[in-house]
Amino acid sequence: MQNNEDAWSVEEYIETRNLVDTYLSDSDRVLATPYDKLDPRHRKIVASYVDLIYKNSKLVEPSISKDLHELLKEEKAYLVSFEHRLKTIESLRRKVIADSKDYDGSYYRAAHNICDSIRYTIIIEDNIYIEKVDEYLHSLENMGYEVLEVKNNWGTEYCQGINARFSDKNSNTIFEIQFHTPIGYQIKEQNTRDLYQVIRDESAPPSLMIRANKLRKLLQTRVEIPENAIGYSYDTSIIRR
């Protein structure tokens, strides 16, 4: 539940939405991507790393996708946004450039540490959410995938859900699976995606970024938390067959 200081008036909500819409649709705004703004030498370096990542992802993805479809074929849970399971070249370029700032400007280190060039989203109903997340993690481990990290964002200020990273059993390529509830996914895709666009846009006015982020956090509080979701952690010592 939100506290009083987080409450927004209808007018404030509408005003923020209008400001975000206006900013994102402004034809006079510079539309060049971060990649386009690089000098030719840096573009060549980034392009070479991204090309390798993308080609490897296209090679590895079909076998992972096949296993996930097999895992879920008799289940109530289901994959969504499957057509976006591969990050686009443009998105990879943007991520390498942005992340390089965390690695002293090294495009190589930024590219080497990308973990979601292949990513999936699984929707699970609230009443079986944690039970199924835990079951699927163990099932994938039993199928030969290594569970590298399970990040539980329930109850935090971030997008509500659980993100897990795996290492592919054949290539050691790292990929990501996001586990959402139906309403959590709806909030993420339909209500906060445009806000994220503003928040990550370094050219956006700071005041607009602050308002967009405040609204994003408010909307996340609207996602009902499944039973036992807060505090859940994956126990690799449990063997499930």
Image (spheres, rainbow, N blue to C red):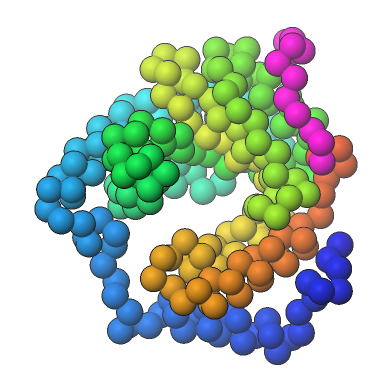
x and y percentages locating residue 136 in the rendered image: 68, 26
Question: Is 55 or 109 nearer to us in this picture?
Answer: 109
64 inside magenta stretch: no
Left or right of 240, for residue 34: left
Q: Main secondary structure of the magenta part?
A: loop
Q: Is residue 207 toward the left or the right of residue 233 in the image?
A: left
In the image, residue 171 lies at what x, y percent? Answer: 39, 17
> What number of labels is visible?
0
Q: Going by the picture, which residue comes out furthest to the bottom?
A: 11
67 left or right, relative to 53: right
Query: Which residue is found at the position 60% from the left and 32% from the top?
Result: 164
Which corner quadrant holds the C terminus?
top right
Q: Residue at x 53, y 77 (%)?
A: 208
The N terminus - image quarter: bottom right
Q: Residue 239, relative to residue 98: is it above or below?
A: above
Q: Residue at x 44, y 47 (%)?
A: 84
Horizontal side of residue 109 vs 5, given as left or right: left
Q: Which residues are magenta?
A: 230-241
Indicate whether 224 appears above or below 21. above
Can see residue 200? yes
Front-lying residue, 198 or 164: 198
Return the x and y of residue 68 as percentages of the image width and height.
55, 28
Residue, far front: 104
Q: Is residue 192 above or below residue 40?
A: below
The residue located at (77%, 38%) in the rendering is 129
Q: Position of residue 55 (x, y in %)?
A: 27, 33
- Asked if residue 43 is positioned above or below residue 77 in the image, the reply reads below
Res 49 quadrant in image: top left
Q: Is residue 127 visible?
A: no
